[in-house]
Image: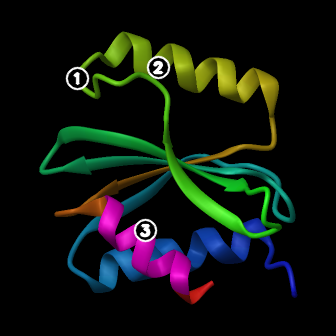
Amino acid sequence: MTRLKSRFLVDLLLRRTESAGGFATVLAKGDETSGIILVQCTERGRPGPLLERRFSETGRYIWEAVGPTDPHDGEARKNYQERRRKADPDMWLIELDIADAPQLVAEWAALT
């Protein structure tokens, strides 16, 4: 299976979100080739889950919710993102502001 570069995947996600009428932005740029991707979901400015693209035991990439369980705890979310960035400085941090961002990510992931 061909492994797509992180920058390519991020660009696809940004375009997919914008074509669906949402807003997407890169909050922190990671490694162009192999940086992990962390997506901060919001809807009309209200925080939603953090999603991370991870390599699964089956040898495929999956998206799963990570970080604090309360998306409204901004301090805990910020701390999680900082810890994650220290553990992996190649991390991409993307913000999506669109209705049902997790569903959009799932649909996009199925294409990649």
Do residues under tags 1 and 2 come within 8 Å of each other at their CB atoms? no
Give, as a single range, the part of the protein colored magenta.
Answer: 102-110
Residue 111 position (above or below residue 43): below
Q: Is residue 45 magenta?
A: no
26 with respect to 54 (left or right)? left
Q: Marks 1 and 2, Cα distance to the nearest angstrom?
A: 11 Å
Which residue extends farthest front? 58
Q: Main secondary structure of the magenta part?
A: helix
Give the class, few, some or many, for how many residues have Cα within 10 Å of label 3's Cα (few <14, many ≥20): many
Residue 80 is tagged as none
Of label 3 and label 1, which has the lower sequence position? 1
Residue 78 is tagged as 2
Residue at position x 29%, y 16% in the image = 73
Residue 105 is tagged as 3
Which element carries disc 2, helix, strand or loop? helix
Q: Which residue is mark 1?
A: 72
Residue at position x 38%, y 11% in the image = 75
Amino acid at circle 2: Lys
